[in-house]
Image (spheres, coloured by chain):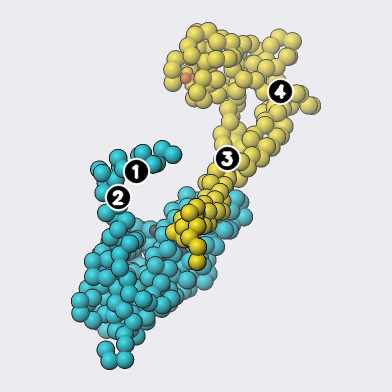
Amino acid sequence: MARSPNLSRRGFIMSVMTFAGSIMGIVVGLPVIGFLISPALNVTKSDAWVPVGKLDSYPVGVPTPFSFTRTKVNGWEKTVNSISVFVLRDATDKVRVFSSVCTHLGCRVTFHKDSNEFICPCHDAHFNKDGGVVSGPPPRPLDQYESKVENGALLIHVIQS
Amino acid sequence: MISKRMYPWLDERLGLSGIYKTVLDRMVPKVNWWFTLGSATLFLFALQVVTGIMLSAYYVPSPDKAYDSIQYIMNGVAFGWLIRGIHHWGATLMVITVFLHMLRVFFYAAYKYPREITWTTGVFLLLATLGMGFTGYLLPWDQKAYWATTVGTSIAGTVPGIGEFILRALRGGSDLSGVTLARFFSAHIWMFPAIIIALIGVHIYLVIRIGISSVPKEND
Ligand code: HEM
Ligand code: FES
């Protein structure tokens, strides 16, 4: 049998093995990657109008905290997330509802009546009564919830992802 | 290609071609397909390690979450059915290949001098593999798992004299409980794999050092 100068028996087997090996690597590797990052890809959004009490119960001009919990299915368990907001009602009954989540890195702010500011304990951010950044690292004002009043009850629009 | 220039550099320092020659280019007698069962078992073990590590990313070894976490693997995680399926069937196949491998060694009388230690490590590898199957079977924490382990540990409990003690040691108490699940999980992912990896090391070292036996001939 004539010897091929180009492809030896050993070279042929090597290429076949490399090819088959790569295919197997991909067939196994891709599902494994999909398996691991799967929770990052399954984003489910839900939204609801959540009642946060009677509008009249909120004092005028002072941001007042309100907390509630929302449950969400995370993988094999229900996670209870507690959400707290600050309701600021003005003299004309216009309402703004601030999220207590600091816009820097997500700690919770509290309202300090003495200085009339929201203060975050984590990196000392100060926000004024309207949510604007006074000092500290946050890149933007406090987030606000959409709100509406129905039969005297205040409702806020909570979107969870 | 980079590897053309990298290889001699690495080889000089790591001795790669030496490893290649002793491990893969070693002399073997002319044998048959029964001699591939050890390698098949090794491959299956590697597969079990990989898929097992993947499962542990979602599995929770606690009585109130184990079952739910596996339901999530099956229905909520991409390719979860595949990874668990491979682990499930790989476990069954591995027990089969270990057994057939042992039978081949037995019928070819390959356990004799100088391979007694290879055989002995093999016996412990068989037991450890069965241990993997026994401890893994409880992990789904469904009815089948629960009662299989109730029965299995009760069998161990019938040993005269110390049976009661063995039963309690296996279960971590007199009843099957969360303590049992935790210790079975620990045995399944740490203790048995550590034992198996160490034994495989000795086993394969001996196979390479001594070389494999040839098929016995008429006058042997
Ligand atoms: C390092 C290696 C291994 C790790 C990390 C590992 C991990 C796991 C985990 C987390 C589970 C629970 C998920 C499930 O039940 O599907 C499991 C189940 C199981 N494992 Fe392993 N495993 C390994 C090797 C093995 C080996 C070598 C065998 C057997 C010979 C084995 C046999 C089983 C069995 C029978 C189940 C129950 C499967 C079922 O019914 O769904 N495992 N393993
Ligand atoms: S998280 Fe609030 S200041 Fe950094």
Cα gap from disc 2 to disc 3, whole angstroms: 40 Å
Q: Are marks 1 and 3 on the same chain?
A: no
Cα gap from disc 2 to disc 1, whole angstroms: 9 Å
Subunit of label 3: A
In the foreground, A15 or B32: A15
Residue type at mark 3? Ala
Image quarter where the C terminus of chain B lies is: bottom left
In the foreground, A65 or B172: B172
Residue type at mark 2? Leu
Numbered circle sitting on residue B16: 2
Residue type at mark 4? Glu
Cα gap from disc 1 to disc 3, whole angstroms: 39 Å
Image quarter where the N terminus of chain B lies is: top left
Q: Ligand 1 appears in which quadrant?
A: bottom left
Q: Give the labeled residue for mark 3.
A: A40
- Label 3: which secondary element: helix
Cα gap from disc 4 to disc 2, whole angstroms: 66 Å
Residue B7 visible to the viewer: yes
Q: Are marks 1 and 3 in contact (CB under 8 Å)?
A: no
Tell me: residue A53, above or below residue B79: above
Q: Give the labeled residue for mark 4.
A: A146
Q: Is residue A37 left or right of residue B163?
A: right
Q: Are marks 4 and 2 on the same chain?
A: no
